[in-house]
Every structure is written in C-alpha cells, then in structure tokens.
Amino acid sequence: MGRFEVNVKVSNLAQPERTAEVSLLVDTGATLSWLPRDFLERIGVRPMARGRFQLPDGRYVEREKGGVLLSVDGQTVAMTVAFAEPGEATVLGATALEALGLAVDPVKQKLVPHDLYI
C-alpha cells in the first residue's frame, strides 16, 4: 500500500472550542493514533493513562494516552490517542479509521466511506 497523509481536526474533549489541525500518516497497522505531545498540550489535552506499545521494529515503549475528538472528512468521534514524543511517527491508526467509518483506498491513496458493523 502507498503511504499518504490526511488532515485531521483535533479538539479537546472538555473544551471542544480548543481545536487545531494536523497532518497524519494513515497507518492501518497502528492500533491507536499517535499525535505529537506538544500539539496535544497546546490544545489542553492531558494524559489520563499509560499504555505499552510495540513499535514496528519490535521494541516496546510506554506512552501516555488521552482523549480527544477527531474529525476527518466531516465525521467526528471521541477517541483515545497516544502522546508521541519528539522524533516519533505521528499517525492516524486503525481504531480511529474504523470508528470514523473510513477505509483506505490504496490505489487512489485516500480515505473512503466504509460501513460500520455491529
């Protein structure tokens, strides 16, 4: 699959008027979305928990997690995201894509609407 980025609007759950946009790499192999710590702190998002993550190279790291509103292509959902440290990839992960009802079109390198399942 080709690699591509999408613009994502991110809002603070407690103060939805605190919002900003970021370009994220679409990564269907990532469970959660990873957003830059400084970006999240700028809109007032605070960590609520820590989680253990396996990186693509097989190493494990612990990162803080918090809740945000993610908006892509007119769809908005409340999601848990990881606080990425400087130098780490920032991605839109699989759980956000599924919750937003979006799938990856690898040929056109874009997101397309997808049915949600129960």
Image: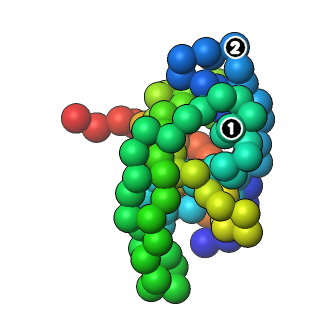
Dot 1: what SS?
Answer: helix
Q: Residue at x 48, y 34 (%)?
A: 67
Q: Which residue is mark 2?
A: 17
Using the rendered view, name the quadrant where residue 26 is placed: bottom right
| Residue 89: quarter of image | bottom right
The residue sitting at 73% across, 46% down in the picture is 38
Q: Position of residue 27 (x, y in %)?
A: 57, 62
Q: Position of residue 88 (x, y in %)?
A: 67, 67
Q: Confirm whether residue 100 shows in the render.
A: no
Residue type highlighted by circle 2: Glu
Q: Secondary structure at mark 2?
A: loop
Looking at the picture, the colour scheme in use is rainbow
Quadrant location, the C terminus: top left
Instruction: Using the image as rendered, state which of residue 105 and residue 58 is in the foreground.
Output: 58
Is 42 positioned to the left or the right of 70 in the image?
right
Q: Is residue 101 left or right of residue 21?
A: left
- Residue at (73% x, 69% y) in the render: 87
> Marks 2 and 1, how far apart in space?
14 Å
Q: Nearer the viewer, residue 90 or 48?
A: 48
Residue drawn at the location 62% of the way across and 16% of the way down: 16
Which of discs 2 and 1 lies nearer the camera? The answer is: 1
Left-right relation of 6 to 67: right
Residue 84 in percent (x, y) is at 62, 57
| Total numbered labels | 2
In the rendered view, tell whether residue 52 sits above or below residue 20.
Answer: below
Label 1: which residue? 41
Residue 66: x and y in percent read: 49, 39
Q: Is residue 87 above or below residue 94?
A: below
Say which label, 2 or 1, has the lower sequence index: 2
